[in-house]
Amino acid sequence: MRKISIFGATGSIGQSTIDLIARAPQDYQVVALSGGKNIAQLAEDAKKLGAQIAVTAEQSLLDDLRLALAGTGIEVAAGRAALLEAADRPCDWAMSAIVGAAGLEPGLRAMQAGAHLALANKESMVCAGPLMLRTARSRGVDLLPVDSEHSAVFQALMGEDISAVERVIITASGGAFRDWPLQELARATPSQAATHPNWDMGQRITIDSASMFNKALELIETKEFFDFKPEQIETVVHPESMIHALVGFNDGGFMAHVGPADMRHAIGFALHHPTRKKLPVERLDLVKLGQFTFRDPCETRWPALRLAREVMQAGGLMGAVFNASKEIALDAFIAEQIGFTDMAAVVEQVLTRLSSHSGHNPDAISLDMVLEADHLARHEAAQVIADLS
Ligand code: NAD
Ligand code: MG
């Protein structure tokens, strides 16, 4: 029996993880499940999986959670400190699937406690890549990418000589607005942006797909995870979302990873690593699919891609600045305070204001430095937004 914990259990990735675990309950002992406002889901899953502890990030919902789990013997807790305490509980494998920079510390703490970490929370690598890798190395645990593109690169690199890699291409669906006329983007609403053509995901990542901020984060995540140079990392729009990434070698060949748009593939790969096990995902019918198409990732339509290249070049704490200002700009867009195209403008201004956060020695980057840069960038972004509106 493997001991596992799932942080962000009530979200889209968390629920897909639970779907896989619940198919073989005899193989797992669930230590901690964490969620946010959806207490009914958290309680139902904690009961179904026989978790040791259920934690909600919302302090005010502790009584609701206690009531929902009364008489079950499952421990309950609430708030940030309780979440971090739950991450300190030893387990063999943990899923990091909280959305945003809030997912960084629980993942780090789980690795420090000895867990192999399945990382859906791409923000951890964007904000603190060197710290994540250093922690995994010093604790002797695996850090396994769950983002579909990064799982694809990881799989394409298995058994390969990394020095023979010339380029890596991360594919992008193009999101909700890939076919919209450019001049209409400024008027796009949050509900229009939150509809994805191929993937069923949380609201925030779906809007980030429409703006390509999600792909921008993923380009930075690629650099941090695999230590490629920024100029080796490319993206291409691939509307079918079947090829997740391609690794190009010095002999001119590509290794491409192809699979259905179902996150249970990448989650299952990380869950069973280093073995491969049968997974309940669709088997592709290539003839029925007919064709794979590719389009230019236009930086006029998606300025986030240009910003990502600048952030990769700048290095240091600029990833943390980029992510935090993006999170605040996204909040403001969801609250209809700013328009869709204002998000990139806000992030660009914050990057300019905090450009002194570039160029640190990766080995010297600490959690405190990351949290401070994150805090400062949120403050600056709020000011830029206030000036706009
Ligand atoms: P989601 O919004 O569906 O779920 C987020 C989870 O995090 C929920 O359980 C929520 O309660 C919890 N949460 C939110 N804010 C929190 C906070 N401040 N403190 C503690 N918990 C909090 O998100 P998702 O789509 O499942 O994405 C999760 C992560 O995985 C993100 O980093 C996302 O970029 C990444 N990811 C998602 C997908 C996908 O298909 N959904 C694919 C690749 C990567
Ligand atoms: Mg992805």
Image (cartoon, rainbow, N blue to C red):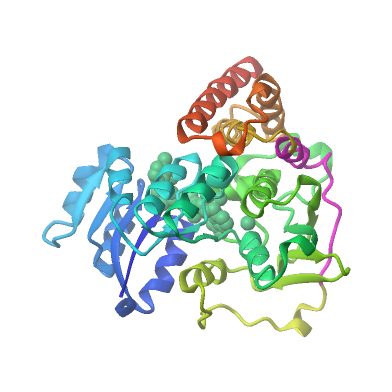
Is 155 drawn above or below residue 58 in the view shown? below
What residue lies at 39% left-to-right and 59% top-to-bottom? 115
Q: Where is residue 291, by image quadrant?
A: bottom right
Image quadrant containing the N terminus: bottom left
Specify whether residue 239 is painted magenta. no
Q: Which residues are magenta?
A: 292-312
Is 343 drawn above or below residue 40 in the view shown? above
Is 46 drawn above or below residue 299 in the view shown? below
Q: Position of residue 249 (x, y in %)?
A: 82, 66
Is 65 drawn above or below residue 73 in the view shown? above
Going by the picture, which residue comes out furthest to the left? 71
Q: Where is residue 43, by image quadrant?
A: bottom left
Q: How many dots with numbers? A: 0
What residue lies at 75% left-to-right and 48% top-to-bottom? 229
Whether residue 201 is visible, yes or no, is no
| Nearer-the-camera pick, 250 or 281 | 250
Q: Where is residue 319, by image quadrant?
A: top right
Image quadrant containing the C terminus: top right
Q: Position of residue 113 (x, y in %)?
A: 34, 53
Q: Position of residue 134 (x, y in %)?
A: 51, 48
